[in-house]
Amino acid sequence: MRAAVFHELKKPLTVETVKDPTPGDDQVVIEVCRCGICGSDLHLTEDAIFGVPGGTVLGHEYAGRVAAIGKGVDRVKVGDHVAMMPLHSCGRCVHCLRGEYAWCSIMRVDGGGYGEYSLGFQHQCVPLPKTVSLDDGALVEPMAVGLHGVLLAQSQPGDRVLVIGAGPIGLAATYWARRLGAGRIAVTAGSTRRATLALTMGADAFLDPADASPEAAIRALGGMPDVVYECVGVPGMIARGIDYVRPRGTVVVLGLCTREDHFMPFTLVSKEARLQASAFYDRRDFEVCADALDKDADTQRAMVTDVIQLEDMPPVFEALRQRTTQCKVLVDPRPRAR
């Protein structure tokens, strides 16, 4: 099969022929139909902290069709349409039985979506509703990241919400905050290029980057935010969230920052604010997001700015390291029609 393969830090992926996956016990082979390019994959290919070995096929935001099953597989069958939870886990421990694969003792993030076929365990498969297109199924994973963060905020109906960052995760947090009862929602980002998209996803206001002060947020929201979602992942953003949030409010950190960061503990303590990290999701989050695609695919699909073929992926992947007009780029790894 063909796949985009990682070989070395800070070097482009290469599209090449690799061995077809074969399912073992309890495993399934997925024919990948769409895979999203995630910002975390950009981090994985440039930062040694993740320890990704050469020869790895990345890509964890994917959906596809069950192409083959191994011995003991009884939850899915060949031909089923599924979104894959990319959390490798044992499937048997107390955490896995609760659908909390992230806390399994052997958990690791699986890739494989940047190839024509991928291998996983049957408990990682989340069935897609029959009316959901496989073209949209790759959106389940990033939407689940946003949903999990919003649920961890434990916000109340009518809460004022500020989202820092208008990338896919910030937009997903905006979408779920709106649908789970937020009052006014404002989004702030480093540029206005996704302002319209933020409003489409549920925001009431987009702060002008030239004046994104706490006072501007108060004007947009009608008061200090009860909840702030930090979805950028660069140094200084946690401190910014703490500055924005009201006393006894909540700052949820969704951004993936791999550099040292600093904030003033006194500011957090004096506000008696809550700092909540959010990294993954559980099976229920995936199921809710799959169901939401069934009901509201058009809104979520607005994040998708391009669909590319596997052969075109390396230069597009590298271009995403810089500021771009792209939001969510999906890869179609299936052979180009002749």
Image (cartoon, grey):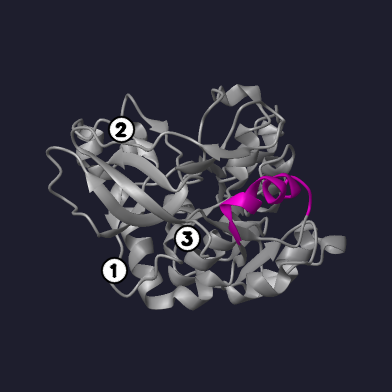
Q: Say few, some or many: other residues with alpha carbon within 10 Å of mark 1 (under 14 / 14 to 19 / 20 or more).
A: some
Mark 1 highlights which residue?
129
The answer to the question of whether label 3 and label 1 lie on touching residues, with beta carbons closer than 8 A, is no
Point out which mark residue 89 bears.
2
Q: In what element is the residue under mark 2?
A: loop
Q: Which residue sits furthest right?
A: 210
Question: What residue type is disc 3 on?
Answer: Leu
- Please give the range of residues in magenta: 308-323
Quarter the N terminus occupies: top left
Where is residue 122 drawn, in percent x and y?
Answer: 23, 44
Mark 3 highlights which residue?
139
Point out which mark residue 268 bears.
none
Residue drawn at x 36%, y 71% is 132
Give the spatial CA distance, label 2 vs label 3. 22 Å
Q: Say few, some or many: other residues with alpha carbon within 10 Å of mark 3 (under 14 / 14 to 19 / 20 or more).
A: many
Foreground of the two, 161 or 215: 161
Q: In what element is the residue under mark 3?
A: helix
156 vs 253, left or right, is left
79 vs 275, left or right, is left
The answer to the question of whether label 2 and label 1 lie on touching residues, with beta carbons closer than 8 A, is no
Foreground of the two, 247 or 12: 12
Residue drawn at x 45%, y 66% is 136
